[in-house]
Image (tube, helix red, strand yellow):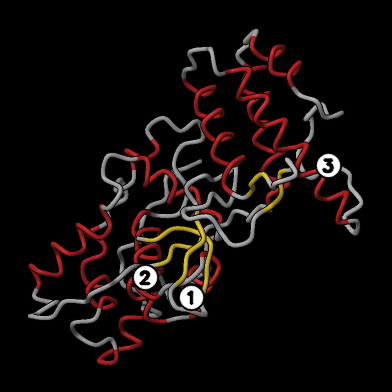
Amino acid sequence: MALGTSDNQRRFDDPVAVLGDRLKGGSIYKLLAENGHELFPDDYFADCYSGARDGRPTVPARILATVMLLQAFEGLSDREATDRLGFDLRWQAAAGVAVGAEAFHATVLVGARNRLRASERPRRLFEDTKVVAKATGALGQRARVLDSTPIYDAVATEDTVTQLRAVIRKLLVVLDQSADPLAAEVRRALSRDDEYATPGKPPCDWDDRGAREALVDALVKDANAALDALSDHELEGATKAAAELLALVSGQDVAMSEDGIFRIVRGVAKDRVISTTDTEARHGHKSKNRHFDGYKA
């Protein structure tokens, strides 16, 4: 993909001119409108994409950084944030785009966020903005105190059955990809009539409570059997990570009853993994009645 570049020329449809005095001094919108081109040059995220096969996104760094900052500031989802860029004059002024600018797709934020978290400066947006805010006096003697800011994730939250089967399948895939002889040993330990070759839930009569419980019990026992098969081996890299995820998922939602059957327990385990595709996402809440799945910043 080509590198996105910002348009720094003032236009007749400039939202800063349209808003005039309504773009109040001291606001984050005015701060970004006046300093965004210096804060977020076109190569601002270059290090995040140094090893990327497809290069950097076509969205200019200033626009992407501004949307991510304002998303955290207002507590919006990815889709809400990109929609806001398309109709909110304050966002358009802050991002340095023309009135009525077309927003980019929400999934761009997911990729950018993942790369930013993996970079050497994952909090650069907040650190750099704070420096400019202090230098320009935009903060004055005030400080905005946050307990946390929800960062919503795009992954689908997975139920216990889906997760159990997915982590067993993930371990087998990793072993197969590395041509590890342990793959055959793990498969011999599994008792379910399931090759774990496809994603998703296995067949089951979901209206039958006994059938559901039998499936959960069989999946947990397969997970434990796989871990037992690996217990005497030194694991490294992706195999170690897959085994650790298997151990975590197989113990977070289930417990053995007095009859020796593994069943799903009531309640939610602390720090529960909610997705096997994004293991850092968690259940969160901003208030007693407002919940979200994603991250806290």
Determine the residue positioned at 36% across, 70% down: 70
Residue 29 horizontal side relative to residue 255, left or right: left
- Say which amino acid is labelled 2: Leu
Say if mark 2 contacts mark 1, CB within 8 Å: yes
Query: Where 201 falls versus 6 (above or below)?
Result: above
What residue would you read off at disc 2?
A: 70
Which percent across, then down, holds residue 201?
79, 45
Residue 202: numbered disc: 3
Alpha-carbon span between mark 3 and mark 2: 42 Å
Give the number of the mark in front: 3 or 1.
3
Q: How far apart are marks 3 and 1 (CA)?
A: 40 Å
Q: Residue at x 70, y 37 (%)?
A: 220
Closer-to-camera residue (99/225): 225
- Snapshot quadrant of residue 203: top right
**Label 1 near label 3: C-beta < 8 Å?**
no
The residue at which mark 1 appears reads as 84
Q: Is residue 270 left or right of residue 26?
A: right
Residue type at numbered disc 3? Pro
For the C terminus, the quadrant is bottom left
Residue under the image location 49 percent in, 17 percent down: 235
Residue at the top extreme?
Answer: 181
